[in-house]
Amino acid sequence: LRLSILSQHPLVNTMVDSDFMDARGEDGMAEDHQQLLPLCGTEGASWPSRLSQCAGVRWPVAAAALLACSVLTAGVAIVHVHGPLRPLRKAAIGSRGVPDQQKLDAVGGGASVKIWQTAREQGHLERLTDTNLAADFDFSGPTVTVDVGARDQQIVGFGGAFTESSAVTFQKMNPTLQEQFLSGYFDEAGLGFTVGRVHINSCDFSVASYSFDDHAGDVELQYFDSEASHDSQALIPLIQRAQQRISQRSQSMRLLATPWSPPSWMKGNAKMDTSSRPCIRPEYRDTWARYLAKWVSTYKAKGVPIWAMTVQNEPQGNSSWEACLMAPPEEADFLGEHLGPVMKSAHPEVSIFVHDDQKNMMPDYARAAFSHPTANKYTDGVAFHWYTGDWFDKVAEVHRQYPGAMLLASEATYEKRMWKPGAVQAYPEWRFGEGYAHDIIGDLNAGAMGWIDWNLLLDMSGGPNHVGNMCDAAAVADLQEQVLHWHPQYYYMGHFSKFILPGSTRLQTSVEGSTAYAGTLRGYGTCTGQDGLQATSFVRPDRQIVTVVLNCGDGPIEFKLRVGSGALRASVPAHGIQTYLLPAS
């Protein structure tokens, strides 16, 4: 909202750009927006017209139907089809696959298109002037074509990780900052996050190593802390606050739980940090499986149900913090012989993901699990991280080989080693936002059904972290000045999470006439002008179509967006991202 008077209203998060608009339409109008109406327009007028008077913006009104005729793209330019497409799979969201395909009507000229934009030095999630689709036309530049008849995976959602570091930082913020944080991430006017990740026992982003049972040899888990005393101090309360905000939108959080390390007494090296090989002592493998099930029960008793879990965080990484090495056959054996049967009996509703490590190793872990005689019965999906670079081809390979598996991007961040030289505190870096968007588009187009950021919140040091592994975050709190800083990653993630709602289905999207990076493997989160114009598209449950386009180059890109038989001429600025929303018509 543009008017300065609104920035003084206590319900407006002034840390977020003034044009940070809710895209869910009239029926999704949040209560806090409705409370702004006394400041806007004539009493008795409808709220859309009153907000229009206040902000100079026309709010979307839901129309009727969508489209279905796809147009084949011809020409001699370079063609990049984003992601492998296959017949739609029949399953409920949160299990394997996506729901039955629905027929779409043809989108032609005249359909209204709403546009949001974030660009360096040009605004954040700013609502641009609406435009209309015209009949398709000849165009010599880059063309983004959305094939509404070719559909693939369904989206579970977007989100970030609830770590102890995030939770203790949140506790140190004043109530105003806490409200800004919760609203900014979980309200409709914010990013609308619906997915989270939480660590089982401690991780590096904990104040110190801890477990729920430190009694050596407690095979029966008699001393397991079923009260979750440690996590109840900061971590669980933060998750519960987020749950409450999401429930106000008549949605629920899907929470992914991940172990970094068993208690020290279960491990071959007798400590939680680092790992021996094998990690888990053979006599404690079943105990560890029952421990994990008991942890899920404990969180559920606290009102925090678990949607899914991974077998192990980064099983290939022998880090200086909490770790547990598992080669692909070891992980498959543990899942098939211990964890799977225990979880199936205790918590059959909880999905299980394997791998949860770098993309380049995805096919190996997926193959080991799905070819295992018993693990295949308990494997619902494959989770992965971004720290070895793009590797979108590996994600696509697993998607092709195991089309019924859920693929989930479960961690991404910029470690301190990726900051500018000499930086000692976390700072806003525009390329970090671009890198996030590049990875999200690549992962989604390769078959991912969700994307989870690492720490939701950190302090200015990039911590706390008990081994000094400092990182950036989309939200960073200056606890001394009591100021919450939103970094560029926040706005870039919003171009996906605010518009690609849970239950949305990916549409085949091709980009013609633009370059696409074809060089050697780069460091993670790298996006430059060599990547050209990038795009992904989805049809939402309300049958509106979303297309996100990204430009990491130094100059603007003029392009044509073609959807069905309609098209429009558009331009995405240098170092910018745009979201196009086509209502059902």
Image (cartoon, grey):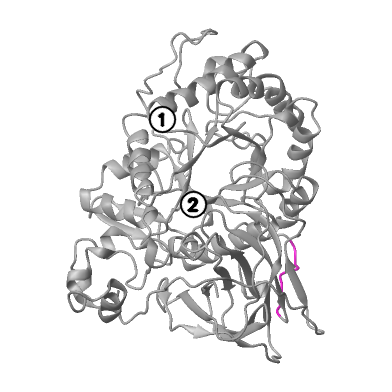
The image shows a total of numbered marks equal to 2
| Secondary element at image label 1 | loop
Residue visible at 75% across and 56% down in the picture: 393
Q: Quadrant of residue 33?
A: bottom left
Q: CA distance from mark 1 to mark 2?
A: 20 Å
Question: What residue sits right under mark 1 in the picture?
Answer: 208
Nearer mark to the viewer, of 1 and 2: 1
> What is the span of residues highlighted in magenta in the rendered image?
514-520
Task: Based on the picture, tell me whether residue 125 belongs to the magenta stretch.
Answer: no
Looking at the image, residue 115 lies above or below residue 166: below
Looking at the image, residue 116 lies above or below residue 348: below
Question: What residue sits right under mark 2 in the picture?
Answer: 416
Looking at the image, residue 301 lies above or below residue 479: above
Front residue of 583 and 501: 583
Query: Do the residues under discs 1 and 2 have CB atoms within 8 angstroms?
Result: no
For residue 496, side relative to residue 99 (left or right): left
**In the rendering, at what x and y percent does residue 285 appear?**
64, 16
Quarter of the rendering occupied by the C terminus: bottom right
Task: Based on the picture, tell me whether residue 518 belongs to the magenta stretch.
Answer: yes
**In the rendering, at what x and y percent does residue 143 appear?**
68, 81
Amino acid type of the residue tagged 2 in the rendering: Lys
Residue visible at 67% across and 37% down in the picture: 380
**In the rendering, at what x and y percent does residue 297 appear?**
47, 23
Quarter of the rendering occupied by the N terminus: bottom left
Front residue of 354 and 344: 344
Front residue of 536 and 113: 113
Check disc 1: other Cα within 10 Å, few if <14, some if 14-19, many if 20+.
some
Q: Is residue 405 visible?
A: yes
Name the dominant secondary structure of the magenta segment.
Answer: loop
